[in-house]
Image (cartoon, rainbow, N blue to C red):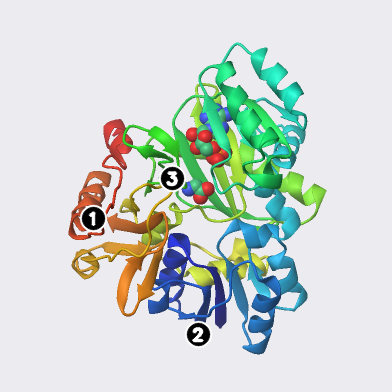
Amino acid sequence: MKILLVGGGGREHALAWKMAGSTLCDRMWAAPGNPGIARHAECVDIPADDTDALVRFAGDNGVDLVVVGPEDPLAGGLSDAVRAAGILCFGPTARGARIEADKAYAKELMRGAAVPTAEARIFTELSAAKQYVLSRDHGVAVKAAGLAKGKGVFVCDEPYQAVRPLEQIMGERVFGEAGRTVLVEERLTGPEATVLALCDGKNIYIAPPLQDHKPIGDGDTGANTGGMGAYSPVPMLDEAMLGRIEREILVPIVDAMRRDFGRYEGVLYAGLMLTPGGPKVIEFNCRFGDPECQPLMMRLDSDLVEAMVAVCEHKLGDIEMRWDPRPSVCVVMASGGYPGPYEKGLAITGLAEAEALDDVAVFQAGTADCDGTLVTAGGRVLGVTARGETIADAQCRAYEAVGHIHFEGAHWRTDIADRAIAAL
Ligand code: AMP
Ligand code: GLY
């Protein structure tokens, strides 16, 4: 098969790394890709949001399967356009992507299907939203309804602290049109988990659960980021709980989408909080998580391309996926200043030494090639990922690999997977 992978971050590097090992993959391109992805695919200089150019490239080069990594192109209709051209596409249509791109829609869908989630009110008027939060007695979470690169959520211990975020989102429009509608949710408590399910519109297949680490600082302190590290499996989430998540959350939401618009095909990402009252949905995403995809791919033993094709051909029930029982841990190395402003173009060294370690893969997220030197080019630069006999062993290997890598200002959390180790 000829495959076109769309995107250029750590998630896409992990996907390219895994797809390149498939017996079904004859040739692979990535648009735009990155220097890490370039080891497995031919990178083509087309931005991930240039739908017309991507569809043209796929048609001109006889591409059989397009795999879309990030949410923006999906929300913009890339999957619809690829399918209209008669090419298989892994990733939902624009209507399906609304589950992530429009949190007000997702909340209504959950309500209609009785999927457990935080109670929420939806507002389009700043004054009404402010009045509402000031009438609350407990903490709230304020969320821009549209896509805001994971930065549009503010969790407030005290209701009055929600006023400023509301003004920024709705008044100053710091996230642009994404802040036209806002959700004010009750604040939930409990450990978080990510559950990723492959969906072919009818069948769902649940992958091993993961846990992300969103805040920038150790002990979950500081600003939220796209994710500073992840691991799998999650000891706090046992088989019984996973069964509940399937019955109470995944099956009803996929059914609700089928009733609303038809088949949802691709990955459904459920961001969950394991509250004292049971698992509840914090958000749905229409794609693999990043960094979650990196430790997940490290544990996938069976053929990823076969699974993606089964999704596109509605034959998910016919295949079996196999996972390495060994846990994996991914530590994100970020640019100095991230998630705020940061410098780019700083030389990265020590990658070869890190990659020479057993059961270690370094996925590149924000990197560029500058006259043969690998340099930083984004906030999250590398996803240093390792497998081990135990979570503690995987964690130890990941941090050993991190210790070999240098770039000016590099920073990372030192407690990725500590919670899992403490829970065992
Ligand atoms: P999201 O982008 O929706 O995943 O939100 C980012 C982070 O904000 C989540 O990972 C949670 O830690 C937190 N969060 C979101 N919604 C709530 C809520 N209703 N209660 C408590 N924390 C929340
Ligand atoms: N790591 C969180 C996300 O991909 O949305």
What's the residue at 32%, 37% (across, down)? 420
* Amino acid type, callout 3: Gly
Residue 227 left/right relative to 265: left
Residue 82 location in percent, x, y? Answer: 70, 73
Q: Earlier in the sequence, mark 3 or mark 1?
A: 3
* Amino acid type, callout 2: Arg
Residue 294 location in percent, x, y? Answer: 40, 58
Instruction: Name the one closer to the observer, 44 or 79.
Output: 44
Residue 200 left/right relative to 330: right
What's the residue at 43%, 61% (across, down)? 10
Residue 350 location in percent, x, y? Answer: 20, 65
Specify the quadrant that holds the C terminus. Answer: top left
- Determine crowd level at label 1: few under 14, some 14-19, many 20+ residues with C-alpha closer than 10 A: many
From the image, tell me which residue sits under label 1.
402
Cβ at disc 1 under 8 Å from ligand 2: no
Instruction: Name the one closer to the observer, 42 or 245.
Output: 42
From the image, tell me which residue sits under label 2.
27
Above or below residue 82? Residue 200 is above
Q: Are marks 3 and 1 in contact (CB under 8 Å)?
A: no
Instruction: Name the one closer to the observer, 98 or 44.
Output: 44
What's the residue at 40%, 63% (across, down)? 377
Task: From the image, state whether disc 3 or disc 1 is nearer to you.
Answer: 3
Residues under labels 1 and 2: Cα distance? 32 Å
Q: Earlier in the sequence, mark 3 or mark 2?
A: 2
* Amino acid type, callout 1: Val
What's the residue at 77%, 74% (across, down)? 84
Q: Secondary structure at mark 3?
A: loop
Q: Earlier in the sequence, mark 1 or mark 2?
A: 2
Label ID, residue 340: 3
Tell me, yes or no, if residue 266 can be seen here: no
Residues under labels 3 and 2: Cα distance? 38 Å
